[in-house]
Image (cartoon, grey):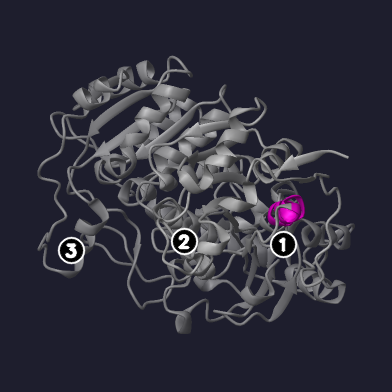
Amino acid sequence: MELLSGADMIARFLQDEGVEYIYGYPGGAALHIYDALFRQDKVKHILVRHEQAATHAADGYARASGNPGTVLVTSGPGATNAVTGIATAYMDSIPMVVLCGQVMSHLIGDDAFQETDIVGVTRPIVKHSFTIRHPSEIPEVLRKAYYLASTGRPGPVVVDIPKDMTTPTERHEYVYPKKIKMRSYNPVARGHTGQIKKAVELMLKARRPVFYTGGGVVTGRACEGLTDLVKRLGHPITTTLMGIGAFPQSDDQCLGWLGMHGSYESNMAMHHADLIIAVGARFDDRVTNNTSKFCPTAKIIHVDIDPSSVSKTVRADVPIVGPAQSVINEMISLLQGREVADPEALSDWWKTIQDWRDERRGKLYEPSKEGELLKPQEVIEAICRLTRGEAYVTTDVGQHQMFAAQYYKFDKPNRFITSGGLGTMGFGFPAAMGIKHNFPEEQVVCITGEGSFQMMMQELSTCKQFGGGVKIINVNNASLGMVRQWQDLNYKSRHAHSYMESLPNFQQLIEAYGFTALRVDTMEELEPALERTFADKHELVFLDVMVDPHEHVYPMQVPLGSMRDMLLSKTERS
């Protein structure tokens, strides 16, 4: 029998769970845990400079690997500083376990120093939460936390740990729970066969089908099966922002991603389809636009692991609750030896789609001329070219995020790492840091803007201490670009507080932390600067690229319209 203190149990459990990195920031309520981590060498602790960065770093790792990220913070402000990152993970269904120190049990409810009811604060933005009531329950509670975070529809789990639960002098039996049982939690293991058969029949009979796939395909590790299924049927496929890479974007069957700033052909195909096969997508408002006008001629098959998501926003004709991987594999099995009922109709559908593609070819944006500032689209295309489309790419939120999604072509899942549901500025850099620690031999690129980068730029100090050769590409338009775009469209170009009028000298700032910084003003400078940036995978380089501040992101859905109602440029509308 092994006897350990509560704090040592936590350290040992993390080892047994296979956690390699934990991101956090110490404080009084968590010091017993920190001392236990200090006395072991298997789990590496990364000291961030802000607790929000800890959650984003763990989140980035989780999105890239598919495994839960781990965070450790102290009570009160330490825990509340982590709230934005917890919400970010929750909105995008990302597995994460957040260990929060708490004041001693007998002080809870007395407004003690640095006391916050973090379980209550985070209740709407977690999958589940626990409070440790006795040190002996730590192994089982932590095992449940990781199990909950990573099964069913993934999400963040908070574990609140009062300081007296980790007292070094109190020791209890430690056993790693290899099996876990939760009477009230039984995630669905497979879809309903009858419903899957109905879906297959509709897919074979459809004349204008479109696959609409989301982040659930990626988190459900169903991308390989999805590619097989779509290839067998010969149907067009579009993805959400979170689903980018679930199907190779370079493949002709991929129409790109859909929604507010999705491609013209994907939005048009969705609107005119007679069958939508939605897998691991939640019919977000950034996709559907006005739900009363959404895909008016289409029947809808909706596959999702979360029963509460099915028919929540748009009614499904064939609802299927189950894991994407299992459902897709059963669909493939049922398709063996069968072909689409009307190949001529499907061929005509592809001709229509190709016409939509041809209609916008060469009109996506107007390249910069000699002497003009670069266009953001040119910058993203150059990054994609130099990294051969194989980098892990994180973004912050805004115009640069949309341009990255549009012009960097992802053929693999888990490579486009972005805050979709919450839209969190400051996400990109710490997320890239978390990915780089765990995938040190890969190129990891953070595409950011000067507004977002300044929210988490203190993490340069973390990279200085712990390494992290990320490449930071600052698409610098000296403004909050997406805010400014909306002001141009809806507020007669009254740019209320959307211009950044007192930016730092980024080169001097980055060099003050001991890193390399470059600046690009012209097209001639771009490619050599990018080559220098990507020369050494292990070197952090900041590239400040000055771009046209007046460039807008197009297409852009017309608010309250249908999916086919889009602004195509400053002067064109579909």
Q: Earlier in the sequence, mark 3 or mark 1?
A: 1
* Number of the label disc, if any, that sits on residue 61: none
Please identify, in this view, whether the residue under mark 3 or under mark 1 is nearer the observer: 1
In the rendered structure, the answer to whether residue 174 lies left or right of residue 297 reads: right
How many C-alpha atoms fall within 10 Å of the one at disc 2: few (<14), some, or many (≥20)? some
Q: Is residue 383 above or below residue 234?
A: above
The quadrant of the image that shows the C terminus is bottom left
Question: Is 325 within the magenta?
Answer: no
Q: Which residues are magenta?
A: 136-146
Q: Nearer the viewer, residue 13 or 504?
A: 13
Please identify, in this view, whether the residue under mark 3 or under mark 2 is nearer the observer: 2
Residue that badge 3 annotates: 487
What's the residue type where badge 1 is placed?
Gly
Q: Nearer the viewer, residue 474 or 572?
A: 474
Please identify, in this view, whether the residue under mark 1 or under mark 2 is nearer the observer: 1
Distance CA(mark 1)–CA(mark 2): 19 Å
* Number of the label disc, if any, that sits on residue 421: 2
Q: Is residue 361 above or below residue 430?
A: below
Where is residue 98 drawn, in percent x and y? 57, 51
Rendered residue at 21%/38% (across/down) = 547
Residue that badge 1 annotates: 152
